[in-house]
Image (cartoon, rainbow, N blue to C red):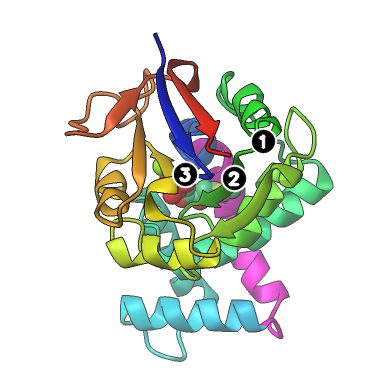
Amino acid sequence: MAQVLRADWVVLDIEGTLMATSAVHVGLYEFARPRLGPWIDAHPGSELVRSAVARVKAEAGLPDDAGTDAVVAVLHGWMDEDRKAAPLKDLQGEIWQRGYASGELVSTYFPDVVPTLRAWVEGGLRLAVFSSGSVTGQVASFSATDHGDLTGLFEHHFDTVNAGPKRERPSYDAIRAGLGEPEPGAVVFCSDVPAELDAAAEAGWQTVGLARAGEPYADADFGDHLVIGSFDEVRIEARR
Ligand SMILES: CSCCC(=O)C(=O)COP(=O)(O)O
Ligand SMILES: [Mg+2]
């Protein structure tokens, strides 16, 4: 018997929740890896690129006059350790946006995801995304999927820049403000990472942990959070 939750909003993590971790770490990261240097060199006038490069140098302790190769070496190291650093995410997001627009990238989700999201929206729930991937990358990834363009399902997108770190409670308060201040208990956050769920619960949100078979957090301790192996194991219904 599926557990029933009632809410106005469902806020969704991407990696490990909607999309396999391998699709991000192999598919998307490996698409971005060889393109980072050429992208930086091809966009010297871009404010996003200038700012990202400056932040990489500052965070990595590189001198101001460090070249693209040194910056790319730092970025590759961050990808190897899956560091969700905002300047890396900004650059990846722009590269992925190009890849999705050209047809080189197409998003694929866990089989239960798209039918569930569509049913939730048809049932009156409102959806938003909170991911470490930049908003640009998020929107691009939903625009070209094996189920077509899914961008219309989501009313808001949040990342670590416009909301804050995913494991800290104030980020969830900021998101709730961005949603128009619904009651905290009227928002459900779905994620595969227990520490993210802890922060959302601290903010008063309902939480659903995704322990999907084969994913990095499948055997994690989810504490008191509701835990499911797929969205087929929960019913979330609109309160209205
Ligand atoms: C196309 S969005 C890419 C997702 C990404 O870059 C990432 O790091 C995912 O992290 P999440 O917070 O969704 O687990
Ligand atoms: Mg995740």
Residue neighbourhood size for the residue with mark 1, other residues' Cα within 10 Å, grouped as few (<14), some (14–19), many (≥20): some
Where residue 214 appears, as percent x and y from the top left, is: 37, 20
Task: Check disc 2 and report the residue beneath it.
Answer: 127
Could you tell me which residue is drawn at 46 percent across and 55 percent down?
A: 132
Which residue matches tag 1?
121
The label number, if any, that marks residue 65 in the structure image = none
Label 2 sits on what residue type?
A: Leu
Residue 38, by quadrant, is: bottom right
- Give 72 or 32, whichever is nearer the viewer: 32
Q: CA distance from mark 3 to mark 1?
A: 17 Å
Residues rendered magenta in the picture: 26-46
Q: Residue at x 44, y 73 (%)?
A: 70
Mark 3–mark 1 CB contact (< 8 Å): no
**Residue receiving disc 3:** 13
Looking at marks 2 and 1 on the same chain, the residue that comes earlier in the sequence is marked by 1
Q: Quadrant of the C terminus?
A: top right
Front residue (pair 89, 45): 89
Q: Do callouts 2 and 1 mark residues in contact (Cβ within 8 Å)? A: yes
The answer to whether residue 93 of the structure is visible from this angle is: no
Is 150 included in the stretch rendered in magenta? no
**What residue occupies the far front of the structure in this picture?**
240
Could you say which is closer to the camera, residue 144 or residue 42?
144
> In what quadrant does ligand 2 lie?
top left
**Secondary structure beneath disc 1?**
helix
Q: Amino acid at mark 3?
A: Asp
Pick whichever of labels 2 and 3 is earlier in the sequence: 3
Mark 3 Cβ and ligand 2 under 8 Å apart: yes
| CA gap, disc 2 and disc 3 | 11 Å
Q: What secondary structure is the stretch in magenta mostly built from?
A: helix
